[in-house]
Image (cartoon, rainbow, N blue to C red):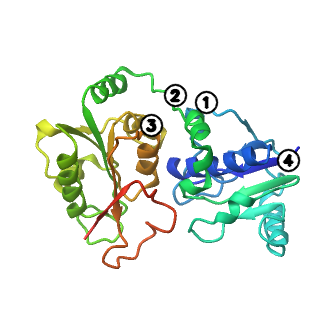
Amino acid sequence: MAKVIVRIKGGLGNQLFCYAAARRVALANQAELVIDDVTGFVRDSQYRRRYMLDHFALPVRKATAAERLEPWERYRRGLAKFISRQRPFGEGSYLEQEGTDFDPRMLELRPSGTIYLDGLWQSEGYFKDVAQTVRADLRLIPPPDSLNLAVAERIRNCQAVALHVRFFDVPGAESLNNVSAKYYRNAITIIEGRVSDPHFFVFSDQAEAVLDRLDLSKERMSLVSHNQGDANAYADLWLMSQCRHFVTANSTFSWWGAWLGESDDSVVLVPDFAAGGVATAWCFKGLIPERWALVPVR
């Protein structure tokens, strides 16, 4: 039986992309999917990310030490990459992502034995044809505390809009990475023109700085700031996914909040960095589903 071993890495949003793409490869090939939850994090000295998919009841198992290429994992992985690069795409035992754009060759991948997948695969295109299965897999286990459950109840009883503000650089600084206040103000205007009596649930990694970017009265918004730190990120993602409409940041975290929570009548707004020639690592080919609306950031 073929086996797909996926190397999970990055923050929660990127981990979900890793899983979803690998799940589709395994399903298309009637292969076993195995999660490497270790090696993508052991050398992450900069961000100190950790595996976070235990908050989902995934129907797969985790890799053994041998499947993680231990011992001497770093050297054995490097050798496997080198050998596979000498062969046509997908014909080696180790497949590393090339570039960031959606690569349709992944949909034709037909491994005959064990294959390692190593990449972020940030596009719905890698798993759109098995979206129903991926959504079923990625049902978050709700946080057990009363505060999050109370916020979720409020969300379900109104025209809730999840609005995510993420600061990659210092708030207020001139930055191509932080989404502009203009984007959020335009997005709010669009939502108010398309949704009757919306209420904005605002999520941010720096709650104290977020209000300067929004033109919202206290009656029209609720600031969700109690789930602090990476360990509680899943709780914010769960709350986002309970909303009906979405204003995302340039972040795979809110990308997944929107994807997991959207329905046929959802309004999903996404920052368009490409408009005006702004060059950032966002809006590359395949990242934004065509049904979502792009809003300029300048």
* Left or right of residue 93, residue 163 in this image: left
In terms of sequence position, does the residue under pointer 2 or pointer 3 come before the other? Answer: 2
- Return the residue at label 4: 2
State the residue position of label 2. Answer: 141
Above/below status of 193 relative to 156: below
Q: CA distance from mark 4 to mark 3?
A: 35 Å
Residue 218 location, x and y as percent? 12, 39
Marks 2/4: CA–CA distance: 30 Å
Residue kind at label 2, given as amino acid type = Ile
Q: Is residue 218 visible?
A: yes
The three-letter code of the residue at mark 4 reads: Ala
Q: How far, Cα to Cα, is label 2 from label 3?
A: 12 Å
- Looking at the image, the residue that sits furthest to the bottom is 277
Gap between marks 1 and 4 measured at Cα: 23 Å
Cβ–Cβ below 8 Å for labels 4 and 3?
A: no
Q: Report the residue marked by disc 3.
A: 232
- Earlier residue among tags 3 and 1: 1
Report which residue position mark 1 lands on.
Answer: 57
Closest to the camera, between mark 2 and mark 4, is 4
Q: Earlier in the sequence, mark 2 or mark 4?
A: 4
